[in-house]
Each structure stands twice: as structure tokens, then as C-alpha cells.
Image (spheres, grey):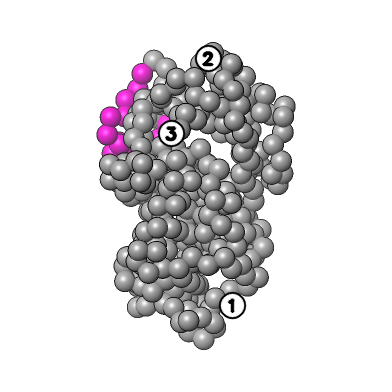
Amino acid sequence: MSSDVIVVGGGVTGLTTGLTLAEAGNLVRVWSREAAESTTSAVAGALWWPYRVEPEELVGEWSLTSYQVYEELAAKPEETGVRLVGGVHADTSPAGLGAWAAELPGLRETATGLRAVLPLIDMPVHLRWLRERLAAVGTTVENRGITDFAEPASEAGVVVNCTGLGARELVPDAAVRPVRGQLVVVENPGIEEWYTAADPASSATTYFFPQPRGRLILGGTAEEDDWSLTPDPRTAEAIVGRCAEVRPEIAGARVIGHRVGLRPARTGGVRIEAKPLPGDGLLVHNYGHGGAGVTVAWGCAEAVAGLVGREGR
């Protein structure tokens, strides 16, 4: 089968990019080494917010583009997995944010921090919605990994690299590194708003996100260069303890499960760049989103579509 575009990577970045390119009129296929529910995206807490992501001068625009999409998708939360939920970023003020913050509706400073109503995403539902949208526009998602870009380049004129942490070996790009995040899922004791308290200088963070079906996601960690996917019991206990200091009822909540994901960070920030491939092909990179893959997904997808369009394909 010959395609205009092959997107490599089946997490939220790859699926969103594939959908954006397909809706722009390209014939698209998505190749993914693993099913979407097995990707880092599937275990994300998934609150929209530009967190641990660069470059600063571009992230704001990408994030706002995504916000506008999620705001529309929140009209059908059961279908899309997107809801608009209120909460507080503790110890945060507008002065510490970029110009993008002025464009967020309802953002206000309070005695406890920065209050906002933001998109909060149920990732398994959202990833399923993305796959269904892709299928509706004729895009196939294939269980297929690669060891170099020559393979997809032999079948499509444009290859888009959305491999996340895999880009470290595939590109190769030594600037890509993991930032380990561990979460605890508990039965929600009645908490309706999200809360975050994240110190960029610390590997320990505190947050909780209410999700549908009676779940509350507790976090977390940001452990750089840690490749372990095994939940650590002591870390889990510390996460519950920190969250319970904010909301004491969390201490007695029944633990449902544990999650670990490796955020695909990159020194220098997100890489969106077009490179030539042998035989007049085009390789477009879209990786290095760190802890903000969901936040910038649609904005980055539009940036990729712009590069593909400028090449006349």
C-alpha cells in the first residue's frame, strides 16, 4: 500500500498528528510498536497545563491551540474523555507564567494559589476516541515497529516521527531522556476538584485528579534518567501521604492500582523539524514533549501539518 504519510508512534502525539494530517487531506497510516493503551499516554494524569516542557517561546501557542480543541471536545465528555474541571495550582501566580496565561478564561489568583477551570482528560477514553476518529477518515493504525526510517520511507513520501522516548535510539538523539512518573489510583472519597503543588527543583510532586468511574489519581514523581517501570511501594506510600496532607480523606481511600510512565523529555525541548530522506522523501520530527504531551498535542500537530504542507505534499 502506498501512502502520502506514515506517522510512526501511537501515543497521543502520534494519533493526534495522524488525525490532523488526515483531516487536512493526506492519506495517512499510523505505525505503532505497541497498542495505544500500552503507551506512556495511557497512564498520564492528563491535566492540561504546560508542565516541564520547552521551548518557552513556542509552548504557549501550542498549548492554547490544544486548549481550544479540548474546550470543544468537553461538550461530549463520555465520548471524548475530556472534561472541564476546576482546581488550584498551589503556590503559583500569573507572574510566573508566560503570556499564554492571559488568554485563559477564568484564571485568577487566590490565597491558596492559582485557580482555574482546565481540561482534565480520561486518557483511555480519549485514546479510543482518537482511534475511532482516525478510522472514520480512513486512517489505519498498524501494530508495527521500526529500527530505522528507511522502512516507512519506502512506502510513503512523508514520514512523521512521533516515537517519544524511542527517538533516543531511533534518530538517534542523546538529548532524549526519561523522566519517571509514578501514580497511585484510589477510590475517590468525594473529591471533585484537582490540585497540584509541583516544585520544578524536586523529584517529588503532589497532585490529585478526579476521574470518572469513581477514581482519583494521586501523584507523583519526576525522576530524571530513571528507566524503571516497576511501582515502588515506598514511593506510593509517600505519594498518598503528601496528598492526604492536603485532603485528609485520601488517607483512608482504597488503593485500586499503581501506574508508572516515562515522560519523553528532551534537553532543548520539543523538536519539530523537517529533514530530507533519500529518494526525495521527507522526515518530520515531533518528539520531546516531556510531561506535556497532552497539553501541546494539537498545537504540535498543526505545526507538523504546516511543515508537510510547505513541502507541497
Tell me residue 258's x, y (percent). 63, 35
Q: Earlier in the sequence, mark 2 or mark 1?
A: 1
Residue depicted at x 49% and y 65%: 141
Looking at the image, can residue 111 be seen? yes
Image depth: mark 1 or mark 3 in front: 3
Identify the residue under disc 1: 151
Q: Regarding mark 1 in the picture, which secondary structure is present there?
A: helix
Residue depicted at x 58% and y 74%: 149
Q: Marks 2/1: CA distance? A: 53 Å
How would you rate the neighbour count of disc 1 (Cα within 10 Å): few for under 14, some for 14-19, many for 20 or more? few
Tell me residue 133's x, y (percent). 37, 59
Residue depicted at x 39% and y 62%: 134
Q: Quadrant of residue 172?
A: bottom right
Front residue of 239/279: it is: 239
Image depth: mark 2 or mark 1 in front: 2
Looking at the image, can residue 59 be seen? no
Tell me residue 150's x, y (percent). 59, 78
Identify the residue under disc 3: 212
Tell me residue 181's x, y (percent). 61, 39
Q: Marks 3/2: CA distance? A: 18 Å
Left or right side of 247 for 312: left
**Which quadrant is the C terminus positioned in?**
bottom left
Q: Earlier in the sequence, mark 3 or mark 2?
A: 3
Work out whether 163 lies above or below 69: below
Identify the residue under disc 2: 249
Query: Label 3 sits on what residue type?
Result: Pro
Query: Label 1 sits on what residue type?
Result: Glu
Q: Regarding mark 2 in the picture, which secondary structure is present there?
A: helix
**Span highlighted in magenta in the image:** 96-110
